[in-house]
Image (cartoon, helix red, strand yellow):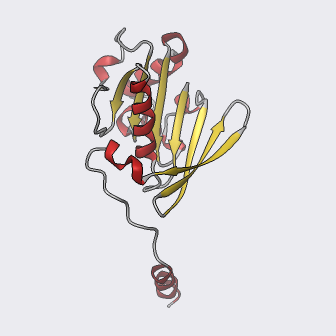
């Protein structure tokens, strides 16, 4: 399964990634990650692992993996290796989780294989609105997640600033009209 977690900055993508990785570890699954997780039991994902048999029957978590799946570098060696890995995910029993601000930033060879999309929406009072979409059927489920409770799962995580206030937005509108 290839899952993309997408949404604007501060909507909980990294926190959701951490929650899923922790759940995978708790059920005994091997976890590799390129993310700042604050819990033990996972190994850092690196390019050296791409050709390795260690990447079998495991989950890989990539938090904004610009160097690995960048849509602007489709011919790079790294992108080519990652595209090969993602094309083999079913045979290798790999679950791949990728968090990005916008899925268009991901190499199109990988984007075409996405099975599940988690869309992060507005955050209010520490709760995030999330839509989980099954890409094969189009079915979706709406979920509210307590993001504050997930802060300890990510190293150095600090509460994001709230959305711009009404005063700030009004100021911008007035300034641009003058």
**Above or below, 98 relative to 151:** above
Q: Is residue 72 at least partly visible in the picture?
A: no
Q: Residue at x 40, y 19 (%)?
A: 28
Residue found at the far bottom of this picture? 178
Is residue 7 left or right of 136 when viewed as pictured?
left
Q: How many marks?
A: 0
Front in this rendered view, residue 117 or 105: 117
Front in this rendered view, residue 117 or 106: 117
Q: Position of residue 109 (x, y in %)?
A: 54, 28
Is residue 28 left or right of 88 when viewed as pictured?
left
Q: Position of residue 97 (x, y in %)?
A: 47, 32
Is residue 51 left or right of 128 when viewed as pictured?
left
Quarter of the image where one finds residue 25: top left
Front in this rendered view, residue 164 or 105: 164
Q: Position of residue 141 (x, y in %)?
A: 67, 43
Q: Residue at x 46, y 44 (%)?
A: 100
């Amino acid at each position: 399964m290839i899952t993309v977690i997408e949404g604007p900055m501060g909507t909980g993508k990294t926190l959701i990634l951490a929650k899923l990785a922790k759940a995978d570890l708790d059920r005994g699954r091997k976890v590799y990650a390129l993310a700042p997780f604050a819990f033990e039991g996972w190994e850092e994902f690196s390019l050296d692992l791409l050709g390795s048999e260690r990447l079998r029957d495991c989950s890989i978590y990539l938090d904004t993996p610009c160097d690995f799946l960048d849509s602007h570098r489709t011919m790079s060696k790294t992108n080519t290796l990652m595209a090969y890995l993602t094309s083999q995910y079913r045979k290798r029993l790999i679950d791949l989780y990728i968090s990005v601000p916008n899925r268009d930033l991901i190499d199109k060879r990988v984007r075409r294989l996405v099975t599940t999309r988690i869309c992060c929406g507005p955050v209010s009072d520490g709760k995030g609105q999330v839509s989980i979409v099954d890409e094969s059927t189009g079915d979706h489920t709406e979920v509210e997640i307590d993001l504050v409770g997930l802060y300890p799962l990510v190293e150095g995580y600090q509460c994001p600033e709230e959305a711009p206030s009404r005063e700030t937005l009004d100021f911008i509108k007035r300034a641009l009209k003058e």
